[in-house]
Amino acid sequence: MKVREAMTRDVRLVSPDQPIREAAKLMAELDIGALPVQENDRLVGMITDRDIAVRAVAAGRGPDTAVREVMSGEIKYCYEDQSVDEVTQNMGELRIRRLPVLSREKRLVGILSLGDLAIDESARDEAGEALGGISRPGGQHSQSQEQH
């Protein structure tokens, strides 16, 4: 199965200059945890609910903070013509739950999430394997105050 067969095509975007309040409201409306950030018709980042919680709220930043100040600028992505098996293996290794999907011309065409794969019966095994990779125990957790 190809990524284009499993991805979500209707993708909402935010701009880097929008306040995080608007990004958070859109995430709540759509019941999603991440939004691609677009500037001048190019994908420039991703903002997640975790970015807002950790990089903004926990750091004392207010709701009018610009998306660009807390978004992840290093974008991991996949192509619409890649196999789901290959991409889910990469998701597990990278420990990420969603990826922007690009055309070979580097235009955003969708988002692939583990949720998309869990809904599709033919991709459930791949989703489970990716989740297993994402959920594996890592090193010391950065949220911990104590050194164990």
Image (cartoon, rainbow, N blue to C red):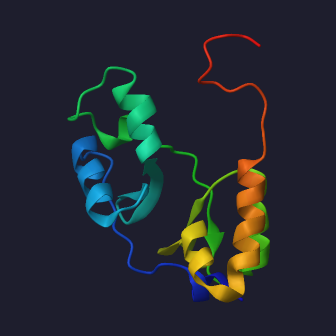
40 left or right, relative to 1: left
Q: Which quarter shows the N terminus?
A: bottom right
Q: Position of residue 67 (x, y in %)?
A: 33, 42
Q: Which quarter shows the C terminus?
A: top right
Residue 51 in sight: yes
Residue 4 or 44: which is nearer the viewer? 4
Residue depicted at x 78% and y 40%: 137
Residue extending furthest toward the top? 146
113 left or right, relative to 39: right
Q: Position of residue 6 (x, y in %)?
A: 59, 83
124 left or right, relative to 119: right
Residue depicted at x 55% and y 70%: 115
Residue 1 or 138: which is nearer the viewer? 138
Picture mark count: 0
Q: Position of residue 30 (x, y in %)?
A: 31, 65
114 over 94 or under it: above or below: below
Residue depicted at x 54% and y 79%: 7
Residue depicted at x 51% and y 45%: 73
Name which quarter of the figure residue 21 lies in: top left
Residue 106 in sight: no
Residue 3 or 129: which is nearer the viewer? 129
Q: Position of residue 5 (x, y in %)?
A: 59, 89
